[in-house]
Amino acid sequence: MKKCLVILVSVMCFLSANAQMRWNAKYQSYIDQYKDLAIEEMIRYRVPASITLAQGILESGAGSSELTRKGNNHFGIKCHDWTGRTIYHDDDELQECFRAYDNALQSYEDHCKFLRNGQRYRSLFSLPITDYKGWANGLKAAGYATNPRYASQLIGIIELYKLYQYDNAKSYDKFMAKRSGTDQPVDGNGQLHSIHIYNKNYYLYARQGDTFKLIGKEIGISYKKIARYNERDSKDPLVPGEIIWLKKKQKRADKEFKNRPHIVRAGESMYSIAQYYGIRLKSLYKMNGISPDESIRVGQRLKVR
């Protein structure tokens, strides 16, 4: 009977803990916004992106905490030997000193440096970068947070949102590493563009106020090259929502479009179709035996591969 009671209590605790860990749109939005930055810092400092994102969510309230809103501090790091800008906030004690940053990029980088250079976190770097459970438990054991459930909370977030997938970045990380050293993200809120992968290439969506020069500065690639990859003039204005490719486009669409023609829709052009599939405009014309002087019509079927 006593054994059954122990089992029952354990099950109830397990269900209670999991009931609290439900999918949260606010958390997902935070992940979408900062996953590229977490991957970048993982490449540079070997802190798992999953751990960085989970800590960012917990420590900043998914970007809504006062420390984050007023000081861009996503990880609750206190002043210690800090010589930069500061902000004061009630924590374990009243009006404690916390580090403040100009943008999220600086906060993410300082978080990784804080762990990398901290004596008490040194043993974590002997763990595989994919061992998020070891990292979560190690952070708690090293005293990163006083919450007794800190490790289980990190693990719960990582598993619910599948953050462990970002710890396996490979070809992606070589490209993302080019963003290192960038001091000023595109907008004043420290929000980097989300970078996506398609057809063996990388792309982002232009935002209000974007230019090739601003995007080039953020990514760490010549803006003239980016314009050339997109078959544009480097001074061309960008329309919010348009696709901007970050490497030279392919000659044909992804293999999923083999024997699947594109049906021209109203408002489309050969250029917009080429951009959509990540293929060169010249190749699209050649595949379809069309001259640049010819017009396309709604409903026309075009080969893209």
Image: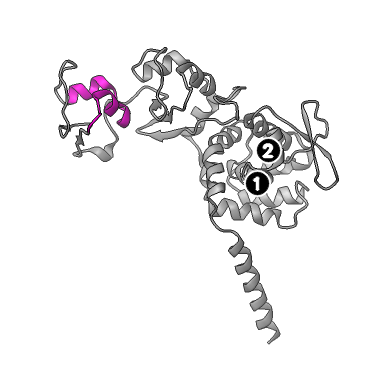
Residue 105 location, x and y as percent? 62, 30
Span of residues in magenta: 266-287
| Left or right of residue 295: residue 178 | right
Q: Which residue is mark 2?
A: 68
Q: Is residue 14 left or right of residue 248?
A: right
Q: Quadrant of residue 121?
A: top right
Q: Mark 2 and 1 residues: CB-CB less than 8 Å, in contact?
A: yes
Q: Nearer the viewer, residue 95 or 31?
A: 95
Q: For the residue labelled by badge 1, is the local secondary structure a helix, a strand or a loop?
A: loop
Q: Amino acid at mark 2?
A: Thr
Earlier residue among tags 2 and 1: 1
Q: List x then y, in percent, for residue 278.
A: 33, 29
Distance between the alpha carbons at the discs numbered 2 and 1: 9 Å
The image's mark for residue 61 is: 1
Relative to 68, say whether 231 is above or below: above
Give the class, few, some or many, for how many residues have Cα within 10 Å of label 2's Cα (few <14, many ≥20): many
